[in-house]
Amino acid sequence: MRKLKLHGFNNLTKTLSFNIYDIAYAQSAAHRKEYIEYIDEAYNADRLTDILNDVADIIGANILNTARQDYDPQGASVTMMISEEPVVSETISNTPSPGPLPEAVVSHLDKSHITVHTYPESHPDHGISTFRVDIDVSTCGRVSPLKALNYLIHRFDSDIVILDYRVRGFTRDIHSKKHFIDHRIDSIQDFLSRDTREQYQMLDVNVYQENIFHTKMMLKEIDLDEYLFGVGKEAYSDAEQRKIRMQVKKEMLEMFYGRNMSRRTRQ
């Protein structure tokens, strides 16, 4: 797609939203508690802030302000205000001159944000524990949130990923023609690396005329040792391993399809 010559600022808002799920099996109450504590520490507000700093670098944004919060008993949130252009302070001068007018004390119009919220939880009876991360990257101007896709998917232990991308608003070119999207996109999958696409089963639901793109991703291979918390698979009999594997797979399918599945769900 050729570059558009715009009249003024690019008013399009591009929003990329993630739901990332990590699944674990912890048989005992003690192991489930340890899993929640481990996740809560591994992804506390400070460490999430470091991740969002990386995202800002990847998409070429400048950080204006950051707010962070850890919650009791678990979970954390971080909100980061960003802009496309750096905020340059006026040269400090003590010479007699008028100060700036109110309308001059502003940043650029490319106000954007990145947010992340975490939700660790576990089932008291069935041994399944899950960790959900919700991430929103919303940008204006030339900054594209799609550049952060691969980093975020690989930065978290992503078993299931639900992605939504939407372009809102419009911008005008120099001939006053409205443009409701300024880049070509057929699928969110186009912005994923080949190795990522090969690791996941993926499903698209796109509404092209509304500039809405939706992709679901589910990890293809289940290495049981990667899902067991507290003990390795050698601690379980072959029959127990098959049962746990089916539980994990059922949990993944329910998250992927967004509905409860029959107990007879097969691997």
Image: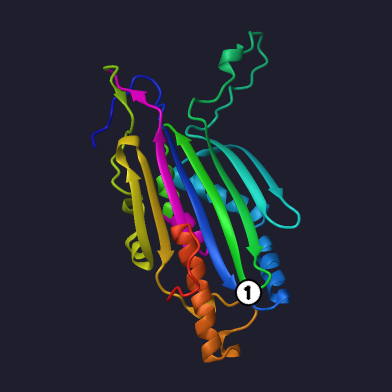
Q: Residue furthest right?
A: 72
Judging depth in this view, the residue of 121 and 97 nearest the camera is: 121
Is 260 positioned to the left or the right of 77 in the image?
Answer: left
| Residue closest to the far left | 2
Where 258 sits versus 176, above or below? below
Name the one closer to the observer, 134 or 174.
Answer: 134
Q: Tell me, yes or no, whether the highlighted magenta stretch contains residue 165.
A: yes
Residue 167 image position (x, y, % from top left): 39, 36
Image quarter of residue 177: top left
Say which amino acid is labelled 1. Gly
Q: Which residues are magenta?
A: 150-174
Residues 119 and 55: in front is 119
Query: Where's the C terminus, which quadrant?
Result: bottom left
SS state under label 1 = loop
- The residue sitting at 34% across, 53% down in the picture is 204
Horizontal side of 189 relative to 65 (left or right) equals left
Q: Which residue has dot 1 on it?
A: 127
Residue 140 % position (x, y): 45, 32
Residue 264 position, x and y percent, is 46, 75
User: How many numbered marks are there?
Assistant: 1
- Judge whether residue 154 can be spotted in this image: no
Whether residue 128 is visible:
yes
